[in-house]
């Protein structure tokens, strides 16, 4: 009887959180931290690779924009009589050159488009960094979810042990034990589902990083943890930097390139220049030289010119609308991120100041009441569910809070989340 009572007291102490804590996860040498994940993504992300190739393509187009066509080598003979004699023969070299102003606008347009693509790459790199941080946050959230569900299984198993002791000493019925066993089975199912979510989050991170399938090994460890970062952000600071966003600047450069395209199209009316140089033979050897200069007159280009001009103007107007759309989209994203950050921060502060201490106190009192026989198992299970639900809500809010901070990083041009300078200034607590 004394041994059973001692076992019951030990179980209750463990339920109250006074027993040994959760063992630390084993660390391996093959760890993928957020810094390493971002570095890999900047090199291997497919979207970034596509934009880089677009820049290379535009760089190649700049060389072709000079408009230099291959020269023509011409052999000419005339005045041929029946005896294979001739009056004149010559070798000539013909070169066509666009009007310099037309070439100038074409080069400027291509160069401006290349600048726009470079800004697009900056925007994509920032977006990929945010995607990696969000994927890593989701991974850490599911990792904490596994820890929470493991704790739920531990509590459920200890409840089964406590209920078994109470049944054996005649203080509870078999029905109470059945309820505890059902709760333990549900906790085990929740743990398996949490592990599935963790694996899905791992592969989501690998996809964003662009990690080769052969490198997606199960032994990769993720050493970071999800902690609360108390960061103060002013809404006016966020909205005041919208004009500096690379996506908006890229749209402006594209619009500028389209306007240069209008000037390039208009300059197509200017005549192109053709220069011919040749060496002549009038029967005494190639001892004579000549040249010929011609102008390409755009007399029959009016229909084509009007069509190309309309296309160029439509493209410029399209990019003007695109710039407005990008600005409105960025403003909406900034507003939503800041308000989401503010709401999540208030929820977390409320949990840490009110929900957490009261839920801990409620669990302790309920456990004490169950030990004294004043509260049945059903009430204890309900309290345990409430306690675990509060922890789950905390981590869900913390994940959302991280997501909003990551979105705000882009507008503030600051590295906040997973930055040691910010982490070290916060409370080093891993559990709520």
Image (tube, grey):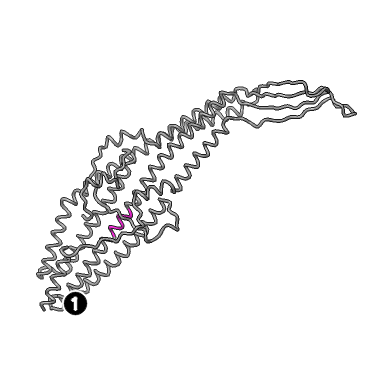
Majority secondary structure in the magenta region: helix
Vertical order, 161 against 298 (above or below)? below
Residue most extreme to the right: 83
The residue stretch that appears in magenta: 138-145
Q: Residue at x 18, y 49 (%)?
A: 350
Q: Residue at x 31, y 47 (%)?
A: 403
Vertical order, 217 against 134 (above or below)? below
**Quarter placement of the C terminus:** bottom left
Q: Residue at x 23, y 59 (%)?
A: 389
Instruction: Give x and y (percent) for residue 232.
Output: 23, 41
Q: Residue 153's quadrant in the figure?
A: bottom left
Q: Residue 191's quadrant in the figure?
A: bottom left
**Quarter placement of the N terminus:** bottom left
Instruction: Give x and y (percent) for residue 390.
Output: 21, 57
Q: Residue at x 61, y 28 (%)?
A: 303
Instruction: Give x and y (percent) for residue 399.
Output: 29, 51
- The residue tagged 1 is 174
Q: Residue 264's quadrant in the figure?
A: top right
Instruction: Give x and y (percent) for residue 381.
Output: 19, 66
Numbered label tally: 1
Secondary element at image label 1: helix
Q: Is residue 123 magenta?
A: no
Count residues near mark 1 (Cα–Cα under 10 Å), then give few for <14, some for 14-19, many for 20+: some
């Amino acid at each position: 009887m004394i041994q059973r009572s001692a076992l019951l007291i030990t179980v209750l102490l463990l339920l109250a959180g006074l027993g040994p804590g959760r063992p630390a996860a084993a660390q391996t040498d093959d760890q993928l931290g957020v810094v390493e994940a971002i570095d890999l993504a900047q090199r291997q992300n497919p979207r970034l690779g596509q934009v880089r190739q677009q820049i290379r393509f535009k760089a190649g187009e700049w060389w072709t924009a000079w408009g230099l066509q291959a020269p023509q080598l011409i052999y000419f003979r005339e005045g041929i009589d029946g005896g294979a004699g001739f009056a004149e023969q010559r070798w000539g070299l013909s070169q066509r050159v666009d009007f310099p102003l037309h070439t100038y606008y074409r080069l400027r347009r291509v160069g401006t488009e290349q600048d726009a693509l470079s800004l697009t790459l900056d925007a994509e790199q920032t977006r990929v960094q945010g995607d990696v941080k969000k994927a890593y946050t989701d991974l850490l959230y599911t990792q904490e979810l596994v820890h929470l569900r493991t704790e739920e299984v531990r509590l459920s198993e200890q409840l089964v042990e406590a209920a078994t002791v109470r049944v054996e000493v005649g203080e509870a019925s078999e029905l109470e034990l059945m309820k505890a066993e059902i709760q333990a089975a549900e906790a085990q199912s929740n743990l398996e589902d949490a592990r599935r979510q963790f694996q899905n989050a791992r592969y989501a991170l690998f996809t964003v990083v662009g990690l080769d399938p052969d490198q997606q090994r199960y032994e990769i460890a993720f050493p970071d943890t999800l902690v609360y970062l108390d960061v103060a952000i002013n809404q006016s600071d966020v909205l005041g930097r919208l004009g500096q966003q690379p996506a908006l600047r890229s749209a402006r450069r594209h619009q500028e390139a389209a306007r240069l395209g209008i000037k390039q199209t208009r300059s197509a009316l200017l005549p192109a220049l053709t220069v011919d140089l040749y060496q002549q033979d009038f029967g005494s050897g190639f001892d004579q030289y000549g040249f010929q200069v011609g102008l390409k007159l755009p007399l029959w280009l009016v229909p084509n010119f009007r069509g190309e001009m309309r296309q160029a103007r439509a493209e410029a107007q399209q990019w003007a609308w695109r710039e407005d759309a990008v600005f409105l989209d960025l403003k909406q994203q900034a507003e939503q991120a800041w308000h989401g950050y503010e709401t999540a921060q208030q929820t977390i502060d409320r949990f840490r100041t009110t929900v957490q201490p009261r839920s801990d106190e409620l669990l302790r009192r309920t456990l004490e009441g169950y030990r004294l026989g004043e509260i049945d198992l059903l009430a204890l299970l309900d309290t345990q569910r409430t306690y675990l639900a509060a922890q789950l809500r905390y981590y869900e809010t913390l994940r959302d809070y991280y997501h909003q901070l990551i979105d705000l990083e882009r507008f503030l041009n600051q590295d906040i989340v997973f930055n040691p300078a910010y982490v070290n200034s916060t409370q080093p607590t891993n559990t709520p």
